[in-house]
Image (spheres, grey):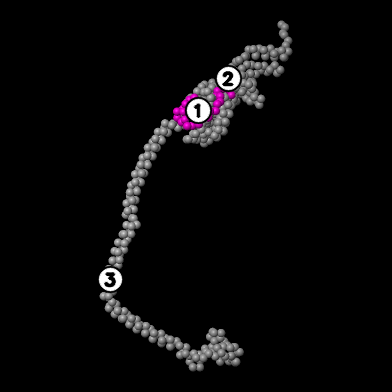
Amino acid sequence: MSLDLMSVSSLNTKIKSLLEATFMHILVEGEVASVTYHSSGHLYFSIKDDKSAIKCVMWRSSVSRMKFRIEKGMHIVVEGSVSVYTPRGEYQFQTVRIEPYGKGALALAFEQLKERLKAKGYFDAQRKKPIPRQIERIALVTAKESAALYDMLKIIEKRWPLVEVIIVDTLVQGDTAASQIANALRYADSLGVDVVVVGRGGGSAEDLWCFNEELVADAIHAMRTPVVSAVGHEVDVLISDYVADLRAPTPSAAMEMILPDRHEILYTLSEYEERFKRAIESRLTQAVRELKHMEEMFHRTSPLRRLEESKMEFKRLEEEFKRLISYKMERFEAALPDVRETFRQTLYFTLQQKEQHLDYLLKKFQMSDPRSQCRRGWAQVSQEGKPVALHAIEADETFILEDAETKIEAVCINKQTLLSDKI
């Protein structure tokens, strides 16, 4: 038995031809064992089941079309072909498309972006700006020739045609729509309008996907102007709805939600007019009554009338005063003899008391007179106006001798002590 001799390169080349010709455009499902998003844009990963694993690669052009990111442990379905790298005799699965197992790629991408933006605070209620009650200028970010724009303009004309409308044209479907919408939103934010409405009519999930892009979410989140998201139908809930300050189920509904109804306004103004008329009539009636009352009060309190009343009151008081004085004089004249006698007796009694008191004071004065108290031969001794004892005066000192009639200034020539200090 003879065997053909082959080189390693020849064998690897035959294996490459066999594998790549046999396993073309196949689907393989498995669990992501490892994943690397390379800086070049390529995706390197491996998938496995409970018995084996295979390396996979997805080139940058295919990665850019993916709506979601794969993660370790995720169950996926990959589409592609087996390729062999002959220099090392290694094979891998060259992937062109990845889908989540049992779940759509768009649905998974939506949930991933929703959780990521929620963690960044894009959906927080406290950051949402209130929609103004009075809107004078509004910017509509949508396709210029779309049915959604026509519907919104029709509602504006019907409800509140006084509002100034600025249309910012943009693509609302396709691969480049997300970046155009983001740019259009930033431009609308610079116009100084009261509110920005971004939206389009209904469509498939793929048609509406540009409103689920992170570019659009970032643009809405960064806007200073309040934003209303009005995309698709009521059942369509998109990332732009979560980030916007207000979600409207449809573009037409957005106009009905933020703009007043002119018919309701006119009806309300009519009611206000009637209330104003009734209030004015009531105020006028009340004013007339108050004016009549004030006129009556004026007549009753007029200066001439008050002066006349004052004159009459003065005359009455004058007569009353005269009668009172006459009555008092009569009473005083009748009581005058008794008063005179009482006054005479009181005066006599008082004079007697004063005379007795005067006699008492005279006797007391006489008893206190120094001249009557001084015995003959005795005088008061003092120095510098103060009484002193004789034993306190030393030889050659001057002193004063004084009795009731005479005052003498003397000098001590000699001093003798008559009694011993021990006695």
Which residue is denoted by mark 1 in the rendering? 230
Task: Name the N-terminal-most of marks 3 and 1.
Answer: 1
Under mark 1, the amino acid is Ala
Please state, as top left, top right, bottom left or bottom right, where the N terminus lies in the image.
top right
Which residue is denoted by mark 2 in the rendering? 77
Q: Residues within 10 Å of mark 2 (few under 14, many from 20)?
A: some
Q: Which numbered mark, 2 or 3, is in the foreground of this view?
A: 3
Most distant residue in the top direction? 1
Which residue is denoted by mark 3 in the rendering? 326
Secondary structure category for the residue under label 3? helix
Under mark 2, the amino acid is Val
Please indicate whether residue 229 sits to the left or right of residue 317 in the image: right
Closer-to-camera residue (108/15): 108
Closer-to-camera residue (404/340): 340
State the CA–CA distance, disc 3 to disc 1. Answer: 105 Å
Task: Name the N-terminal-most of marks 2 and 3.
Answer: 2
Q: Which numbered mark, 1 or 2, is in the foreground of this view?
A: 1
Q: Position of residue 64 (x, y in %)?
A: 61, 23
Please indicate whether residue 135 sits to the left or right of residue 214 in the image: left
Q: Position of residue 310 (x, y in %)?
A: 32, 61
Q: Residues within 10 Å of mark 1 (few under 14, many from 20)?
A: many
Secondary structure category for the residue under label 1? strand
State the CA–CA distance, disc 1 to disc 2. Answer: 34 Å
Find out whether residue 213 is within the magenta segment: no
Under mark 3, the amino acid is Ser
Looking at the picture, does residue 353 appear above or below residue 112? below
Looking at the picture, does residue 352 appear above or below residue 46? below
- The residue at the point 50 percent across, 23 percent down is 147
**Start-end of magenta stretch:** 150-176
Secondary structure category for the residue under label 2? strand
